[in-house]
């Protein structure tokens, strides 16, 4: 497979400078980073959530972090839950399952992103398949994300703790 058509169109329309890094087939953003020899903190991982009204929200966090789902629900004043695989297939029809690009705006989805991504000079993200990463400068990434809310919404993972269980409160 190749870069998702929706993503290609969006990046062209926004005049975003990027390149593509090809790697062996992987299943997760973290595995993609390892396969492409990219530091985990530079990989923007997309997590899609849904509220009780059926409205979607994409949270974009570094691949080595876990989203603070309950805290984000409180901040956004919405009861957010991870979406099902069926929902992901419906939303990201031009992507392979599990290879969601961290560009919710390309799919008409509201997003919030983690400030920790500002610490990386370069950003990588899934391209819509399991064998390519989009690569862009921090400045290009921020230009794409600057109109969306951002703050610290994730934290480092702890071994054996799932995404929904891990809920540290803000400092």
Image (cartoon, rainbow, N blue to C red):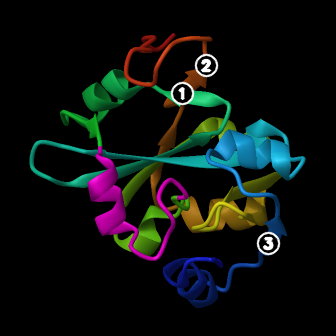
Determine if the magenta segment contains residue 132.
no
Residue placed furthest toward the left = 53
Residue pointed to by mark 2: 157
In this rendering, is residue 105 above or below 2? above
Residue pointed to by mark 1: 66
The magenta stretch is 83-99
Q: Residue at x 67, y 86 (%)?
A: 15
Check residue 20 in the rendering and tell me which mark sits there, or answer none.
3
Q: For the residue carrying disc 3, how many other residues have a C-alpha within 10 Å: few (<14), some (14-19), or many (20+)?
A: some
Q: Residue at x 45, y 25 (%)?
A: 163
Helix, strand or loop at disc 3? Answer: strand
x, y percent for residue 43: 71, 47
Q: Earlier in the sequence, mark 1 or mark 2?
A: 1
As measured in the structure, the alpha-carbon distance from the residue carrying label 3 to the one carrying label 2 is 27 Å
Pointers 1 and 2 in contact (C-beta within 8 Å): yes
x, y percent for residue 155: 58, 22
x, y percent for residue 26: 69, 51
Q: Residue at x 61, y 81 (%)?
A: 11
């Amino acid at each position: 497979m190749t870069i998702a058509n929706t993503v290609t169109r969006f990046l062209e329309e926004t005049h975003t400078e990027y390149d593509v890094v090809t790697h062996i087939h992987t299943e997760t953003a973290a595995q993609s980073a390892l396969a492409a020899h990219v530091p985990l903190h530079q990989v923007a991982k997309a997590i899609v959530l849904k509220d009780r009204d059926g409205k979607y929200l994409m949270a974009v966090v570094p691949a080595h972090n876990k989203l603070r789902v309950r805290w984000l629900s409180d901040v956004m004043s919405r009861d957010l839950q991870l979406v099902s695989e069926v929902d992901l297939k419906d939303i990201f029809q031009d992507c392979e399952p599990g290879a969601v690009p961290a560009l919710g705006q390309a799919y008409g989805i509201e997003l919030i992103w983690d400030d920790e991504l500002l610490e990386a000079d370069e950003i990588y993200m899934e391209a819509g398949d399991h064998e390519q990463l989009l690569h862009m400068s921090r400045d290009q990434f921020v230009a794409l994300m600057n109109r969306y809310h951002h703050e610290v919404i994730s934290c480092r993972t702890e071994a054996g703790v799932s995404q929904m269980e891990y809920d540290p409160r803000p400092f």
